[in-house]
C-alpha cells in the first residue's frame, strides 16, 4: 500500500539516477496503478474536482443538485481509474516507460521544482532510465477521454468536450505531481511547528 496516508509509495523518493532505480516489472506497474487509484488523495481530488465542476456547471453537464454532484463524483472517479489504468499500467508496460514520479527534491529552488513537476506530464523515463516523451500519459489521457463518452451525459459527448477532457487530464497529471514534490516540505514544516 502507500507509504503515506495520501500518496503512493514513490512520493518520498528523491530524483535518482537511472542506475539507482531498477526498472519496474509489469507486476509492479500493476501495483502502482492500484496504489495510485485507491490512495485517499485520489478520492479527495475526485471530490474536489466534482465540487468545482458542480459549482461551475461545467462538463460533464449533469445539471444541479445532490444527485448531479454524485454523478459528477462517479464520473471523475471513473476518469481517474481509467487514466491510471491506461497510463500507469497498460501503456507504461507496452511502451516500457517508468511512470513513477521522482521528486526533484529540497536541494532545488521552488520554481525549478514546480516546473519539473508539471513537465513530467510530458516527459518520463524509459524502463532503461532514458528520458522520453511520456507517451503512456498523453495517450492514456486520450483513451480515458474517449472512454468517458460511454458514461458522460449526451451534451458532453462531442469532439470539443472530449478534447477539453483530454487536455484537463494531461494538465491534471502535471499539477498532481506538485503534491509528491512538495509533500516532504510540508511534513518538515509541520514537524518544525510541532503539529
Image (spheres, helix red, strand yellow):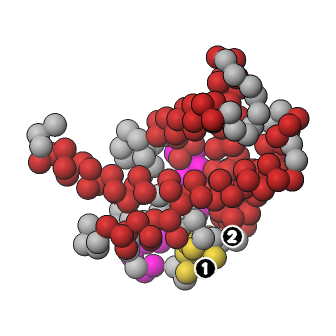
Nearer to us in this view, 98 or 106: 106
Can residue 43 be seen at all in this image of the molecule? Answer: no
* Residue 77 to residue 112: above or below: above
| Contact between labelled residues 2 and 1, with CB atoms less than 8 Å apart | yes
Query: What is the CA distance from the residue labelled 1 to the residue labelled 2?
Result: 8 Å
The residue identified by callout 2 is 135
The residue identified by callout 1 is 132
Circle number at residue 59: none
- The x and y percentages for residue 187 are 24, 48
Looking at the image, residue 19 sits to the left or right of residue 145; the answer is: left
Q: Is residue 95 magenta?
A: no
Image quadrant assignment for residue 112? bottom left
- Name the secondary structure under disc 2: helix
Residue at figure coordinates x 74%, y 63% from the top left = 139
Instruction: Residue at the far top: name it.
Output: 66
Q: Is residue 32 magenta?
A: yes
Nearer to us in this view, 87 or 55: 55
Nearer to us in this view, 162 or 39: 162
- Quadrant in which the C terminus appears: top left
Looking at the image, residue 102 sits to the left or right of residue 125; the answer is: left
- The x and y percentages for residue 4 are 36, 44
Amino acid at each position: 500500500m502507500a507509504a503515506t496516508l495520501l500518496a503512493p509509495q514513490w512520493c518520498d523518493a528523491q530524483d535518482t539516477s537511472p542506475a539507482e532505480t531498477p526498472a519496474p516489472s509489469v507486476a509492479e506497474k500493476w501495483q502502482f496503478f492500484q496504489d495510485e487509484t485507491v490512495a485517499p488523495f485520489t478520492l479527495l481530488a475526485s471530490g474536489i474536482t466534482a465540487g468545482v465542476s458542480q459549482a461551475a456547471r461545467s462538463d460533464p453537464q449533469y445539471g444541479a443538485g445532490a444527485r448531479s454532484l454524485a454523478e459528477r463524483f462517479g464520473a471523475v472517479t471513473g476518469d481517474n481509474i481509467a487514466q491510471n489504468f491506461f497510463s500507469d499500467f497498460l501503456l507504461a508496460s507496452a511502451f516500457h516507460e517508468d511512470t513513477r514520479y521522482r521528486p526533484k527534491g529540497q536541494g532545488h529552488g521552488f520554481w525549478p521544482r514546480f516546473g519539473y513537476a508539471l513537465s513530467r506530464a510530458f516527459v518520463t523515463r524509459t524502463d532503461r532510465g532514458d528520458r522520453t516523451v511520456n507517451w503512456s500519459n498523453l495517450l492514456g489521457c486520450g483513451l480515458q477521454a474517449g472512454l468517458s463518452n460511454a458514461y458522460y451525459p449526451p451534451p458532453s459527448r462531442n469532439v470539443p468536450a472530449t478534447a477539453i477532457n483530454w487536455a484537463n487530464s494531461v494538465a491534471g497529471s502535471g499539477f498532481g505531481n506538485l503534491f509528491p514534490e512538495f509533500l516532504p516540505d510540508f511534513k518538515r514544516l509541520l514537524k518544525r511547528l510541532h503539529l
